[in-house]
Image (cartoon, helix red, strand yellow):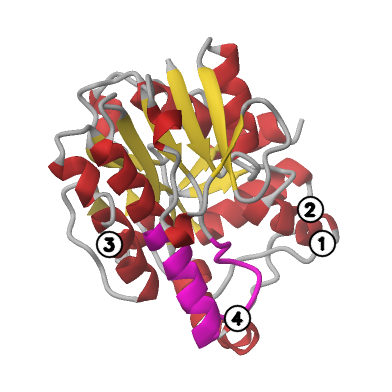
Amino acid sequence: MKVALSGASGALGRPLAAALAAAGHDVLRWVRGTPARADELAWDPAAGGVDAAALEGLGAWIHLSGEPIAGARWTAARKRAIADSRVRSTRTAAEALARSASRPAFLCASAVGFYGDRGGEWLDESSPKGAGFLAGVCAEWERACEPARAAGLRVANLRFGVALDPAAGALASLLALFRLGLGGPLGSGAQYQSWITHADLVAAILHILVSDELSGPVNVVAPAPVTNAELSRALGRVLRRPAFLRTPAFVLRLALGEAADELLLASQRVRPAKLLASGFRFADPELEPALRRLLA
């Protein structure tokens, strides 16, 4: 089908665009600024601009755009940018799709941060919203899809967990520490982390794209979440490095403030109930074998 992709230049967008093309789909990349390739289209989500002609014959729009949430303290300005970049662009896309005669599906990124800090409680798509900044952002992000949903389009809110990629993101940061022998749990280490490999993440999006029964929130995580301490021990075994150097919570809070509590210390034990019920099969369902494959 003809698939529009916003966020195509990101760490997930690049392999997803390649996988879509390999599966035979015609990929159109939304870009901000002047298009440099034949498959690129310009849009300005802040100004509400979408070329209606580009939506003709569209089968789906996969929306991944958003300001990065990690890597720095959350100042008031940064929190506004994190929220606005997601909510405004999503509303722009949803309103444009609602006016389209093509009736495309809308697959929009979200995150398991929707659930807040929930300890050891098992969470699935029916679980209520949690507390905190990220939970609020995710709720507003998903509500911004409402124009498309109200128009009768299929809308799937992709609640991503921590994506494991040795070249980017959380795993890349951990590898640098563990290879120096400085790895270990963060805070108590008891917080659950819901993870997924990049290969399964891309495969899951392709599965959702063609599964008409999948709509609303969909947890895109592996079926076996682990505690941060378990993650540290598994990574230590795979790298054959020590994994006992614990970083106290107060040190993380001094460095990152509120972001430390929500990104590093919050606990989300999430089950991909809808994906499993739809027949999706994970290539990497368990953490340690997944790490061994990624770091072979």
Q: Which mark is residue 241?
A: 2
Find numbered disc 3 in the image and state the secondary structure of the residue it sits on. Answer: helix
Contact (Cβ within 8 Å) of mark 1 with mark 3: no
Magenta stretch: residue 72 in it?
Answer: yes
Q: Which of the two labelled residues, at mark 1 and mark 3, occupies the earlier sequence position?
A: 3
Q: Which mark is residue 139?
A: 3
Contact (Cβ within 8 Å) of mark 2 with mark 1: yes
Callout in the foreground (4, 1): 4
Task: Choose top left, top right, bottom left or bottom right for residue 48.
Answer: bottom left
Circle 1: residue type: Gly
How many numbered tags mark residues here? 4
Circle 4: residue type: Arg
Which sits in the foreground, 180 or 174?
A: 174
Task: Please state if 242 lies on the left or on the right of 180 as rendered.
Answer: left
Placement of the N terminus among the 4 image quadrants: top left
Identify which residue is drawn at 70% across, 70% down.
245
Q: Which residue is mark 1?
A: 181
Callout in the foreground (4, 3): 3
The image shows residue 75 at horizontal and vertical percentages of 55, 85
Circle 3: residue type: Ala
Q: Which residue is mark 4?
A: 73
Magenta stretch: residue 84 in it?
Answer: yes
Q: Can residue 117 be seen from the camera position used here?
A: no
CA neighbours of label 1 inside 10 A, class few (<14), some (14 to 19), many (20+): some
Tell me the distance, in whole angstroms, between the alpha carbons under discs 2 and 1.
Answer: 6 Å
Q: Which of the two labelled residues, at mark 3 and mark 2, occupies the earlier sequence position?
A: 3
